[in-house]
Image: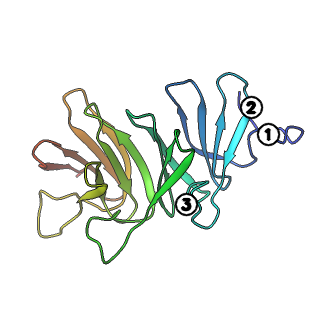
Amino acid sequence: MLQHDPDQPDGLSPGGAWSVLEDAAGAVWVGTIDGGVQVQSATTGRFRSYRAAGGSDRGPNDNDVRALVEDRSRRIWVGTRRGLSVYDRISSRFKHYLHDPADDASLSHDFVRCMLIDRDGTLWIGTYGGGLDRYLPHRDRFAHYRNDPAKVDSLSDDRVYSLLASRDGMLWIGTHGGGLNRLNPRTGAIRRYRYD
């Protein structure tokens, strides 16, 4: 069991954890409530901490880490209440993504609630207030799926809480107050499921 031990300065930080990820090498990444990201080595069992430091590339852009995923390139994506960061193992640096109201292809909202890598390797980002984003790696930009009250085939709510990729390739999107949505990533078609 992983838990805080005040006698071990290189151990897990106190407080809670929002997210946990075991990477391809067996290391355990912990997204904490206010302690940044902590990584337990698969070989030594020791922890290394990455904390936010004013936009520095040495840590994520916030210490409240809500979601963690590993992509096919073994980069670790870190979703926080203040944007998205990606950790590159080769450079040992973080790159940050934030919402920019003047840029339609930026992250749709800084509060990242959940993330998922689908079977095609696509990164999906659920935000709390900006809907769903799909990362476009060839452009290093984001495509958005948002609620449009005039369109029944749009996302039912922009507060995305959970994501699941089903075996048939569909993306299921759980929202806060808008029920469940199913997105066909190939066509972009969205179907809403609500409790009546």
Quadrant for the N terminus in the image: top right
Disc 2 residue type (three-letter): Arg
Q: Do the residues labelled 1 and 3 touch (CB within 8 Å)?
A: no
Q: Mark 1 points at which residue?
A: 10
Q: Measuring from the top left, give residue 81's x and y in whole percent.
A: 51, 61
Q: Name the residue under label 3.
A: 61
Q: Tell me which numbered mark, 1 or 3, is placed earlier along the sequence.
A: 1
Q: Measuring from the top left, give residue 52's x and y in whole percent.
A: 63, 59
Number of other residues with Cα within 10 Å of mark 3, as a class: few under 14, some 14 to 19, many 20 or more: many
Q: Is residue 51 left or right of residue 140?
A: right
Q: What residue is shown at x 56% (from left), y 52% (from top)? A: 65
Q: Tell me which numbered mark, 2 or 3, is placed earlier along the sequence.
A: 2
Q: What residue is shown at x 72% (from left), y 26% (from top)? A: 45
Q: Is residue 111 left or right of residue 163?
A: right
Q: Is mark 3 on a helix, strand or loop?
A: loop
132 in relation to 28, above or below: below
Q: Measuring from the top left, give residue 25's x and y in whole percent.
A: 54, 24
Q: Is mark 1 on a helix, strand or loop?
A: loop
Q: What element carries label 2?
A: loop
Q: What residue is shown at x 19% (from left), y 28% (from top)? A: 168
